[in-house]
Amino acid sequence: MKRKYLISLGIILGGGMLTSNLINSSAAPADLATDTKTAQSSRDPAAHHKPDGGYQNTAANFTENSGMGTILMRYLTETRVDASPSKAIPLMSLTRERLSTLPDTQDSVIRLGHSSILLKISGQTWLIDPVFSNRASPFSFIGPKRFHQPPISLTDLPEIDGVLISHDHYDHLDEASIKQLHHKVRRFIVPLGVEQHLFRWGVTRDKVQSLDWWQSVTLDDIYITATPTQHFSGRGLLDKNQTLWASYVIQSDKSKLFFSGDSGYFDGFKAIGERFGPFDLTMIETGAYDKDWPSIHMTPEQSLQAHLDLGGRQMMPIHNGTFDLAFHSWYEPLERIATLAADADTPLVTPVVGQILDIHNTPESVAWWRELVNLPKLALAAQNQ
């Protein structure tokens, strides 16, 4: 068990176990309009490009992860509590027929688990960071294993208008899912460099558009802008930060959404909010945080602040409840953000996996995780962080 957790830590902190040779180039699809103008910023908009190739974080307070030795010592000495659920995670099954009945006049969001999202907006069907494999890992036999199955199978998914990928880590870019999906996908939108992974997996160049931060594309009535995050990339030992990482602003004729991807807290959220906010819904990373990697993932307190910086109306915490990727209990991110949001009078959306939500008419959320855990222990765990 400890060996499996050690490998999980290696995957999340090192990007993976495989190597790849990435080239930052792609051809823009003919019917996908691209706006290459950058937003005005107090910093050089190209500062995240390293002079010798690859990408970097530019915040003055950015710190690298603690050494693997420090993390290994914690792994060997700390007692973990409730790393995975002891009861089945609730989920609502989806079918292609059910999705087909959603009215085109309704913008809908469905959480598929972790950071995987299905959107039905302006009559189009979009996927974000689709991970359907049993493990977030380069291997099928070891690495972080799902707590629950996806609410719909890959084969049952309808035709997909667009797929957004935030970065190339295994819990966001899943090779097996892309290989099975791409034949029914109209367009892929990815950060710079990530397109090379897709090309190797059989996706044709005419389907893929890669974006730098602040670049935008339109697909019919949907307007997508890649925006900054504070994270890192890599799927192997030799390709760290050779591809870009990004968040996304997604705009339809009636909705404005924000998807954070993975990020530590930084002033980029305020810059995005000033340029594009307010948002009807923010989907904000809330999970896999730790004191030994404070600059690449947010605590729940920081996640809430990011939502406020963005000018969000309601917040959906993502990046939790599906994989064991940190030292905290599986339910802690959800409980902490629920308490914080209540104290701040911030509308929080915590749907059951597979639940269909009307973005403009969301029902009152239920703290479904509380039915699976001991509440006194939960409150104590949150207070002791």
Image (cartoon, rainbow, N blue to C red):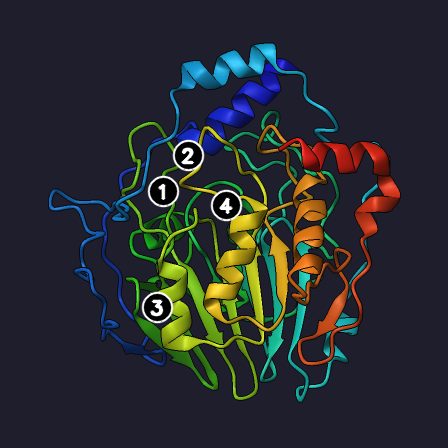
Which residue matches tag 3?
206
User: Label 1 sits on what residue type?
Assistant: Phe
- Quadrant housing the C terminus: top right
**Hey, what amino acid is under mark 2?**
Gly
Name the amino acid, label 4. Answer: Met
The residue at which mark 4 appears reads as: 298
Q: How far apart, in angstroms, are the residues tagged by discs 3 and 2? A: 28 Å
User: Distance of mark 3 from mark 1, alpha carbons?
Assistant: 27 Å
| Image-based side of 124 in relation to 31, left or right | right
Front in this rendered view, residue 317 or 94: 317
- Is 198 placed above or below 316 here? above
Measure the alpha-carbon separation of dots 2 and 1.
8 Å
Q: Would you name the residue on which mark 1 appears?
A: 232
Kindly check if marks 2 and 1 are in contact, taking CB atoms under 8 A apart as contact: yes
Query: Quadrant where the N terminus lies?
Result: top right
Q: Is residue 192 left or right of residue 87?
A: left
Question: In percent of the image, x 34 and y 27: which residue is there?
Answer: 237
Say which element carries label 2.
loop
SS state under label 4: loop
Observer-side mark, 4 or 2, equals: 4
Looking at the image, residue 294 lies above or below residue 78? below
- Disc 2 packing (10 Å; few <14; some 14–19; many ≥20): many
Residue 266, position in %: x, y? Answer: 38, 52
Q: Earlier in the sequence, mark 2 or mark 1?
A: 2
The residue identified by callout 2 is 15
Task: Answer few, some or many: residues within 10 Å of disc 4's Cα (few below 14, many 20 plus, some between 14 and 19).
Answer: many
Please report whichever mark, 3 or 1, sits nearer to the chain's N-terminal start: 3
| Residue 231 shows in this picture | yes
- Report the residue at 73% width, 79% height from top: 361
Expressed as whole percent of the image width and height from the top left, the position of residue 239 reads 29, 35
Q: Disc 1 and disc 4: Cα gap in Å? A: 14 Å
What's the CA distance linking mark 3 and mark 4? 36 Å
